[in-house]
Image (spheres, rainbow, N blue to C red):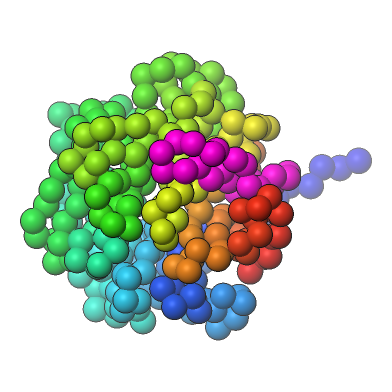
Amino acid sequence: MPVAQRLTNVISSYPNPSPDGERVLFQSNRTGRFEIYVMNVDGGDLTQLTDRPGDNVIPVWSPDGALIAFASSPDGNSDIFLMNADGGEWRRLTDHPGDDSHPHWLAGGSRIIFNSSRTTPDLDADWSSQWHEIFSMNVDGTQLRQHTNCRTVCTYPSFSPDGTRIAYRKVTDTPGFSWDLTTGRRNSEVFVANVDGSNEVNLSNNAGFDGWPVWSPDGTQIVFASNRAGPANVGQLYVVNADGAGLRQITSGPWGHVQPAWSSDGRRIYAYQHQETESYEFGDVVVFDSRILDGIDDRVRQ
């Protein structure tokens, strides 16, 4: 039997629902490079918001729905930008030779948290060997504040709803598994800490690859993705209490589920559902209703 070769590998990922619950932002490479799109929660009224050089990725709504923060690489390295909800009036917030990425908003909308490699001694070093720390800034790019002193890879940060803590992914110098389940000397874990970086707690505490943590709207739980259940290149969603108790797996199946985002009312969790091998990757935005938190896998493809 001849073996078919995939010719199209469209990735539509990093979903982020609007505060009013009516629309969803996401990134997609359907045009040949990553651009930012918005659609209704039923998948209708698809609109492309960006069409500029470089990849435009990881969009997140401001709490009032008026602005979108995202990462873009027009000059080759990633920086943080703002645009209006209709895609207009771009504003560049960071301009640094290091990698600035993964923006999230403080609940009141006054600050944006993100990860940056700007403190790395040698920015020519391999990305995984650079220091990626957690920073935040005002929405005009002023009053930059460093929250962590990881001196390793700390990425995908978010503020707790009350603004007193942060969650993030951290690479530790302990044995662990890569995304393809090969063993290595480093491990990816989910941590929470106070906003000044103190009282750091490992919530995932597993040799599997754990990442993409997001707070629940009430601040009591964190959803994240992990490949601890296997197989290779397949992650599933887990929920854990903010104190590290009550860990449970909430998705399963042959498809991987990563990059979760909670709706503002806490009733839905959006994710990137994908298939991935050494040769290709493709996937779409999906949404689960609140029954998933009771262990019911109620997947709805958008």
Residue 182, percent across and down?
A: 57, 22
Residue 268: quarter of image? bottom right
Residue 101, percent across and down?
A: 30, 51
- 92 inside magenta stretch: no
Image quarter of the N terminus: top right
Viewer-nearest residue: 255 or 73: 255
Viewer-nearest residue: 114 or 242: 242
Residue 265, percent across and down?
A: 48, 69
Residue depicted at 30% across the width and 52% down the height? 159
Residue depicted at 53% across the width and 45% down the height? 239
Q: Residue furthest right?
A: 1
Q: Residue furthest left?
A: 143
Viewer-nearest residue: 298 or 290: 290
Residue depicted at 62% across the width and 64% down the height? 289
Residue 49, percent across and down?
A: 40, 75
Viewer-nearest residue: 107 or 129: 107
Q: Is residue 131 left or right of residue 146?
A: right
Q: Is residue 117 visible?
A: no
Image quarter of the C terminus: bottom right
- The boundaries of the magenta stretch are 236-257
Residue 138: quarter of image? bottom left
Residue 264: quarter of image? bottom left
Q: Is residue 29 left or right of residue 74?
A: right
- 247 inside magenta stretch: yes
